[in-house]
Amino acid sequence: MESRKTRFTRWGFIFATVGSAVGLGNIWKFPYITGEYGGGAFVLVYLLTIMFVGISILIAEMFLGNYGKSDAVSTFEMIGNELPEKKPSMRYLGFMTFNGLIIMTFYSVVIGWIFYYIYSAINGLPTTVSEAETEFSTLIGENIWTQIFFHTFATLTILHFVNGGIKKGIEKLNNLLIPSLLVIMVGLLIYSMTLPAFGDSFKFLFYPEWDKLSSEAFIRAVGHSFFTLSLGMGAIITYSASVPNSINLTKSALTVGFFDTVIALVAGLVIFTFLFQYGEEPSKGAGLVFISMPVIFSQMGEIGSVISVLFLSALAMAGLTSAVSLVEPAVLYVINRFNMSRFRATISMGFVYWLIGIFAILSYSTTYGETFSLFGKPIFDILETTTDSLLLPLSGIFIALVTGYAIRKVDLKKLQIEMGDVMFRVWYFSIRVISPIAVLFLMLNLFGVIEL
Ligand code: PFF
């Protein structure tokens, strides 16, 4: 077993967990789904879910990691063995660890697109929307090798840091990138506040128009709140296995939730200000940052290329720090279970997602798209929606239930002391009742069993 004596420092842990949470989900996905689902009402549902369900499960995941001090599979197995009726089979719940590799199949491809766009921004930006659209659709539909090249480059960068382990790889990467990311985002926010369209952007995000909220939007908001907080795949459990003992888990979870939400809102404010300023539509979908933004940057004149590279670098930093947390849980599991060296574990897990990532790339191509589709949907989309709307929420319910029912209340003492009695009761009720029921309802709705 890999020793968990190599621990994060207190700030190292906060940066790494913020790094895991703040990712493409905040800067790429949150603005475009908010745009697709009409703004304010979607944002409100998202914020409420983060507050009442997300943070509770985040605290539960941190607790489980700190309790088990090992990979997610071993932690669930240990908890099962502690039950009066001994249930080692609970370890199967730990296989949620592999959700991270499934996410990585498309996450790494998108980081590859970002690398490509940084390279392309340095060489000049598209000046019209149709030019930008052609660039994006050519990249995705035709330039398979370019995508494979950048996906491979992203993979090697990520694996390099995972191979360094908790201290020399993951902590180092986060301590460098997270402060840089924060500085860039604050800079972009200040710049966008100087533009007249800032007010419209603010209104779009914070004034709910209820008639735009469909039940589909509701499910996306809940699914996304799991994705954005990195819940339901053992990432937080794995990182929390290496926290210093004295750390306050509740405060850490609140800090992570706070930064994650603020960065998503700042990204939204910045992107929608730019969009409205240049008369663009917010509902462009996944291409928002790759089609609309480059044109806007080019219209800004001189400063545009600088802002473009800064914005894309922030996106790349956010992506990389999340990616290491998506790979590490599976790597740690393989090291512990199969007694593999970290190097071999990293390479083999990396190879698995890299290969499936190539199928995801092919599924968007004009030539091979049909071959790499299932039920008429590209594999890329299937991988994304299955994790987002199904696997993460489902694993989230298990985490809430295990913490709420399989852990003895006396063992939750640490949290009770941190929170105080009243808050603890609210949290306990949330993970035993509110969170599982809320998520279950949404899943039933997703499968058409009930109509919301
Ligand atoms: N939270 C990351 C984001 O918002 O992009 C994605 C993610 C990372 C999801 C780690 C799940 C995870 F375990």
Image (cartoon, rainbow, N blue to C red):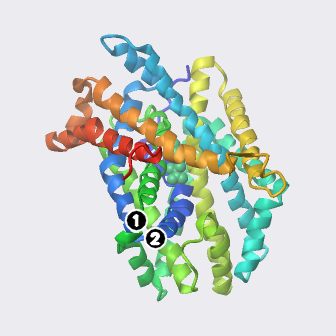
Amino acid type at image mark 1: Leu
Q: Is residue 201 left or right of residue 428?
A: right
- Which quadrant, please, contains the N terminus? top right
Residue that badge 2 annotates:
38
Q: In this view, does 143 lie to the left or right of 83?
A: right
- The x and y percentages for residue 432 are 27, 35
**Is residue 101 depicted above or below 175 in this figure?**
above
**From the viewer's perspective, is the residue at label 2 or at label 1 nearer?**
1
Residue drawn at x 47%, y 53% as measured from the top left? 224
Labels 2 & 1 near each other (Cβ < 8 A)? yes
Mark 1 neighbour class, 10 Å CA radius: few under 14, some 14 to 19, many 20 or more:
some
Q: Residue 332 appears in which quarter of the rendering?
A: top right
- The x and y percentages for residue 51 are 31, 53
- The x and y percentages for residue 21 are 48, 50
In the depicted view, which residue is nearer to us: 389 or 71?
A: 389
SS for dot 2: loop
Residue that badge 1 annotates:
213
Mark 2 neighbour class, 10 Å CA radius: few under 14, some 14 to 19, many 20 or more:
many
